Amino acid sequence: MAKYIIEQSGPLVGEVEISGSKNAVLPILAATVMANGICEINDAPNLKDVNVMCDILRSIGAKVEENWYSHTITVDSRNINSSELPYNLVKKMRASIFVMGPLLARMGKATIALPGGCAIGDRPIDLHTKGLKTLGARVIIDEGLVNASADRLKGALVYLDFPSVGATENIMMAASVAEGVTTIENAAEEPEIVDLASFLNKMGAKIKGAGTDTIRIEGVHNLLGARHSVIPDRIETATFMIGAAITRGDVLIKNSVPDHVRPIIAKLMEAGAVVNDEVDGLRVRGDVNRLVATDIKTLPYPGFPTDAQAMFMAFLATVDGTSHVIETVFENRFMHAAELCKMGANIRVDNRIATIPGNKEDLHGTSVISTDLRAGAALVLAGLVASGKTEVTNIYHIERGYENLVDKFRTLGAKIERVDD
Ligand code: EPZ
């Protein structure tokens, strides 16, 4: 198994370019299932999850070309001929659930293995299935398989008990070709929802309100191929912003969208970092002021993103004073706290609240385990400032969601290398 070896690195300094958004490109690729034509997706990130999604599209008959020189994925979905997703691919990536709505809309049925839980939570799909049932689908879950079918989806009012990102996306895609109008209330408002709606509208869909809590979709008969450039990854942006702060560095983050990371900007500045929206990108400096404790509470967008919680906790372990982190989105997203404690952080977790008495001098290198994608990124950041050497294992989690992470950190002066056991 591969691992990262990280040495205490000093301040990160320089420029880094953000890749396309993992959480935007995955539903957009799923949406190509509904196109009666060829789609060209630009600025796609070369990630394991993206490669798996492309294999899923191929498994149902789409022709998919991945050009990682130009970061373009071309999907010809005119000859899709199957409504069943192969278990061996679905089990690799939870996001395969995004294909359920489009496949149901295209084929009138969809069979997919239950994605199951992961380290951060049970990850149920009840809001996905409830929404599709409201559109007239029959959904049966039996022996670990989800079987959805519908002669013709019909527009309806769908209220989401929780503003689930995936459920909003699945329902929005299926509703795009349903008969009549669908309104999704209490919808998720993430930028990835807006990017998906933008792509669907280029395909011929009629979607309004994406990015607000009420999305209105007027069903159309046919969706065509379209060209789209994916938004930058706001969580990768957050990773390098926090990397600049935790190392007391000075980093210019190019190809970032300040509007997508407002909570990170606000909280880093509360802690004493300096963040400037410059012509070439976001410049984050952790070397200007003494950095101090602050509290964060994760919430659906536009609140503080749960995906940046682990990395921010690593940062809070290095500042003066006691901070508190409240995780409200996932029920088990503090696995990284125990790993940070192995490095000398003195973090106490009580259900959804973590208390972090920070002190930069406490962190020391040791061997730690990446329990999920963002927890792994948090451990990399901690390793950059910990004394001695840090070994991060289970890095396949990290490499699912970050393109060229080692190269990007090295360009900024990080002492990090990837070794195979
Ligand atoms: C998306 O997951 C992201 N993944 C996650 O990013 C992100 O953490 C999450 O949204 C929240 O922002 C992708 O976009 C591929 P949810 P998703 O449905 O759609 C509960 C990363 O690190 N829920 O908004 O699965 C659920 O249990 C990943 O890139 C239900 O109860 O998230 C959770 O507590 C990790 N029933 C909460 O909602 C449902 O049917 C938020 O989940 C669906 C969700």
Image: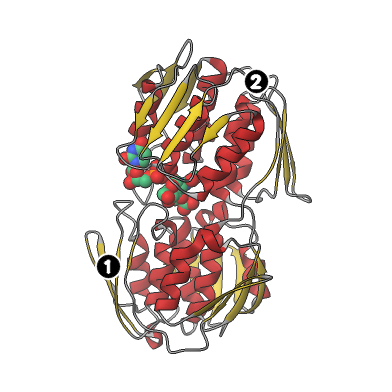
**Label 1: how many Cα within 10 Å (few below 14, some 14–19, many 20+):** some
Q: Local crowd at mark 2 within 10 Å, few (<14), some, or many (≥20)?
A: many
The answer to whether residue 333 is left or right of residue 212 is left
Callouts 2 and 1 close, C-beta under 8 Å? no
Left or right, residue 32 beside residue 87? right
Tell which quarter ligand 1 is in.
top left
In the rendered image of this protein, does residue 380 appear above or below residue 23? below
Residue 1 appearing in the image:
no
Quarter holding the N terminus?
A: bottom right
Q: Which mark is residue 354?
A: 1
In what element is the residue under mark 2?
loop
Three-letter code for the amino acid on which mark 2 is drawn? Ile
In the image, which disc is placed on residue 394?
A: none
Question: Taking the image as drawn, is residue 418 in sight?
Answer: yes
| Gap in angstroms between the C-alphas marked 2 and 1 | 48 Å
Q: Which amino acid lies under the numbered mark 1 shown in the image of this protein?
A: Ala
Residue that lies at the very extreme toward the right in this rendered image:
69
Give percent across and percent down for residue 376.
47, 62
Nearer-N-terminus badge (2/1): 2
Task: Give the labeled residue for mark 2.
Answer: 80
| Whole-percent x, y for residue 77 in the image | 68, 25
Q: Secondary structure at mark 1?
A: strand
Q: Is residue 239 left or right of residue 80?
A: left
Residue at horizontal 51 percent and vertical 65 percent from the top: 238
Q: Quadrant of residue 342?
A: bottom left
From what the image shows, is residue 74 above or below residue 317?
above
